Amino acid sequence: METITTSSTSVTKDTPLMTPEKPNEVVENKVIDRDHRGQTVGDVTVENPRMTARNVNVWYGDKHAIQNVNLDIANNEVAALIGPSGCGKTTFLRCLNRMNDTIDGCLVEGEIALDGKNIYDKDVDVVPLRARVGIVFQKPNPFPKSIYENVAYGPRIHGLARNKTDLDEIVHSSLKRSGLFDEVKDRLDQPGTGLSGGQQQRLCIARAIAVSPEVILMDEPCSALDPIATATIEELIDELRKKYSIVIVTHSMQQAARVSQRTAYFHLGDLIEVGPTSEIFTNPKHKLTEEYITGRFG
Ligand SMILES: Nc1ncnc2c1ncn2[C@@H]1O[C@H](COP(=O)(O)OP(=O)(O)OP(=O)(O)O)[C@@H](O)[C@H]1O
Ligand SMILES: [Mg+2]
């Protein structure tokens, strides 16, 4: 058994998954489980996980928003989280870098490990964690600073540059990798907020990658963008996958199909089904997934 131990907590590939409350009923090759109290359909684990979520539950006060979710995030993979509004996609995504810590009354239970170390352990500092697991929000949110300073901020506070030449290099290469450099190279001292929506989103991606993350979380990153800006971001996601793990929440089935290798379908706080994207979209095994992707639900 492969065991990864980086400090007090060790998470193994065989860390037990929650036992289902009842087995899934299968009729004509489809899982019929409309009250969704069964086990996630498909393999939630991967060979070489970058992150592992085990038995994750989230409450907002009395509201049980995520129920017993188990999911691995692989290296060099884009994983898409899909499902109807309110099913818990954002909530789960935010668990992966402890953004939910900032919400009063939000309780996260279970275990989420990055490279084998539980990120909810008491000795984990969230500041470096959020540099290792960066997040890009639905609405681009550049700081009210110059384009240069937006990207330089993270490397500076994390001490990644020894001098101005190093910092320039990080800023320029991050902007190049996010596909924005050529459009802004002559006005790096201008406010980031003065860019177009698509440019601002690429600036936010440059800001996230400037601190050399391992995982990038994206919550509907293209929902405010036109098709051209969307295509640019999708190409970028494909490029970023060579180096990072990416988890993307999207309401666009076409986008999930275009950019992701694995897709996870959530429904009312449960992870219903996970599998290779091509299979989820052509041959879903759970009735609820099928209804969602064929537009009969959600
Ligand atoms: N800050 C909060 N306080 C209380 N309840 C919340 C909070 N954030 C989310 N919820 C509830 O948790 C559930 C999951 O919400 P979440 O935002 O994760 O859904 P989602 O799948 O991202 O939806 P959408 O597609 O609309 O973005 C919903 O019932 C929502 O009302
Ligand atoms: Mg959401």
Image: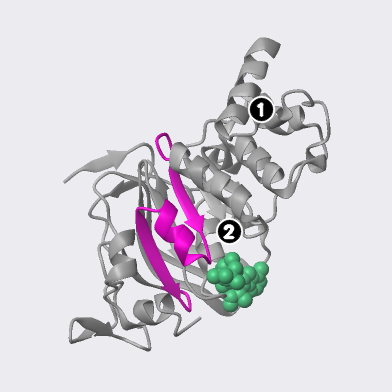
- Residue kind at label 1, given as amino acid type: Asp
Magenta residue check for 263: yes
Q: Position of residue 268 (x, y in %)?
A: 48, 79
Q: Which mark is residue 182?
A: 1
Look at the numbered disc 1 and give the secondary structure of its residue: helix
Look at the numbered disc 2 and give the secondary structure of its residue: loop
Instruction: Say if 108 sits above or below 27 in the image.
Output: above
- Residue kind at label 2, given as amino acid type: Glu
Ligand 1's quadrant is bottom right
Toward the viewer: 111 or 291? Answer: 291
Is residue 110 something that shows in the picture? no
Q: Position of residue 297 (x, y in %)?
A: 47, 84
Q: Look at mark 2 in the image and give the residue it sits on.
A: 220
Residue at the (42%, 55%) spot, across then down: 258
Toward the viewer: 52 or 144? Answer: 144
Instruction: Say if 175 sits above or below 261 in the image.
Output: above
| Mark 2 Cβ and ligand 2 under 8 Å apart | yes
Residue at the (46%, 66%) spot, across then down: 253
Mark 1 or mark 2: whose residue is earlier in sequence: 1
Is residue 208 something that shows in the picture? yes
Q: Position of residue 94 (x, y in %)?
A: 55, 57
The answer to which quarter of the image holds residue 38 is: bottom left
Residue at the (73%, 29%) spot, across then down: 184
Magenta residue check for 67: no
Residue at the (79%, 26%) spot, across then down: 187
Q: Viewer-nearest of labels 1 and 2? A: 1
The answer to which quarter of the image holds residue 105 is: bottom right
Cα separation, mark 1 vs mark 2, equals 25 Å
Position of 230 with respect to 17 (left or right) is right
| Mark 2 Cα-neighbour bin, 10 Å: few <14, some 14–19, many ≥20 | some
Which residues fall within the magenta stretch? 241-270
